[in-house]
Amino acid sequence: MSQLANQLAAAEREEVALGIRQLLASPLITERGKPDAFDLIRRRGEPIRQWFDYYCGWALTIEPRLGYARLAKVRIADDPRRPLRRLRSGKAPFDRRRYVLLCVTAAELLATPVTTIGLLAKRVVQATAADEAITTLDTASREERRALVDVLRLLEHYGVLDAVDGSTESFVESAEAKALHQIDGTLVLRLLSAPIGPSRLEVPLDEVALRFEELLAAVSRERRYGVSSAHSDRPGQSEVQRNLWLRHSVFRRLVDDPVLYFDDLSDAERAYLASPTGRQLLRRAAEQGGFVLEERAEGVLLVDVESVATDSRFPDDAGNAKVAALLLLETLTGPVTVEQLRIQAGELLSRFPRWAEGYRGPDGAERLAADAIEVLMAFGLAQLSSGIVRPLPAAARYTVREARTADSEGASG
């Protein structure tokens, strides 16, 4: 093979790896929102599609003419630490009301390709009033208008809505605000990636809360594994289906979670990952995806040195909670109480009086400690149980060690 051919092959591998990591960070990429990323995924679509299908069992849809690429990530994971977040300062998580309004609004967007924010709000009011299980949207309330705007801005971020005239944010100040939106109905339909539509379950409303885990498994059911729910070792499942599920279940967690601990896997998943085939696929997937594979006795993780494959980073000085989490992590060498971390958070606020203005006040230290703990838990660095915070093995990656010099090494000898 000529040198030019080698260079072209290497360039293709790098682009495929970059496209994989871009889709892991943003499963919905539009040509309008990220033209460079979309162009790369369009050009290298087939090997990227094959990577996701083989290792994770996820379908990648690329529509060049419609200008979007959608990775349908399917996984049974009821994780409250990964909420949708509001696109305003603070990035507060969506609450129950905003999730409800998101579902209702998305349904109403299918009615027309163009709408004003006032007409859309009126349709949402009518839809919520017609359902006895939903509180009617009150556009006279500033808080209600703010909740709807948070939903609309998220849909704008996804490319579903485009404010062609006026500002969506102006609706917070007045229900009479004028803003014209174009709607991409195709992207509305692509938002939901569940294999089974929730409306097909036909479950009585008063049973939903009690059967939530069952319903989550039902909408996530994938027929290719040959079982009634997404688990291995079930009657009627062939050996091929079982191995397929084991591969996909392990790699879904590997690319979705900050760190994959062996203790969190089933016996079958651990055995698969420890097998010669599993180890070979693990290294191959990391190489093809442009990751550095970090293996430890307690688990494995894929490190993206370019920080492309994640929508949230740690360490990161962009948020006070993440800074506090890193500082508290230095002292988290063993189990501590939440109260101890609150005291330490208060000491940080006293030591840096001009830092973390949003956490000043009587309950500032308590809120800072709580948010820092949430960060540590989200990144697989700590766990909280019965008021006790325990560091997890991955926390050792951030241990501050004393620098060793040639002089100190000579003196110790």
Image (cartoon, rainbow, N blue to C red):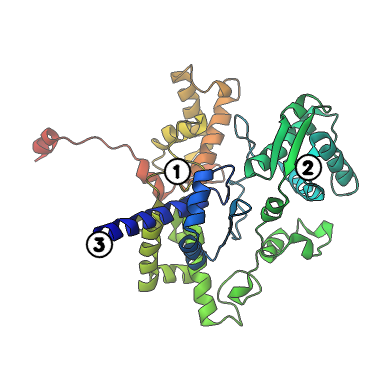
Q: Name the residue under label 3.
A: 2
Q: Distance between the residues labelled 2 and 1?
A: 56 Å
Please name the amino acid that badge 1 sits on: Pro
Q: Which residue is drawn at 59% across and 43% down?
A: 32
Please name the amino acid that badge 2 sits on: Val
- Please tell me which residue lies in front, 295 or 360: 295
Q: Is residue 230 left or right of residue 177?
A: left
Q: Mark 2 points at which residue?
A: 114
Classify mark 1: helix, strand or loop. Answer: loop
Classify mark 2: helix, strand or loop. Answer: strand
Quadrant position of residue 17:
bottom left
Q: In this view, does 394 lie to the left or right of 148?
A: left
Quadrant position of residue 179:
top right
- Point out the tag, 2 or 1, that comes first from the N-terminus: 2
Please name the amino acid that badge 3 sits on: Ser
- Point out the tag, 3 or 1, that comes first from the N-terminus: 3
Q: Distance between the residues labelled 2 and 3?
A: 54 Å
Q: Is residue 52 left or right of residue 291?
A: right
Could one spot residue 250 in this view of the protein?
no
Query: Which marked residue is nearer to the observer: mark 2 or mark 3?
Result: 3
Q: In this view, does 359 lie to the left or right of 347?
A: right
Classify mark 3: helix, strand or loop. Answer: loop
Query: Which marked residue is nearer to the observer: mark 3 or mark 1?
Result: 3
Marks 3/1 in contact by CB < 8 Å: the verdict is no
Quadrant position of residue 143:
top right
Q: In this view, does 351 lie above or below 233?
A: above
Q: Which residue is drawn at 78% across and 61% down?
A: 199
Could one spot residue 225 in this view of the protein?
yes
Position of the N terminus, as image quadrant, is bottom left
Q: Which residue is drawn at 71% across and 34% down?
A: 164
Question: Measured from the top left, where is residue 210 in percent x and y?
Answer: 75, 58
Q: Name the residue under label 1.
A: 335
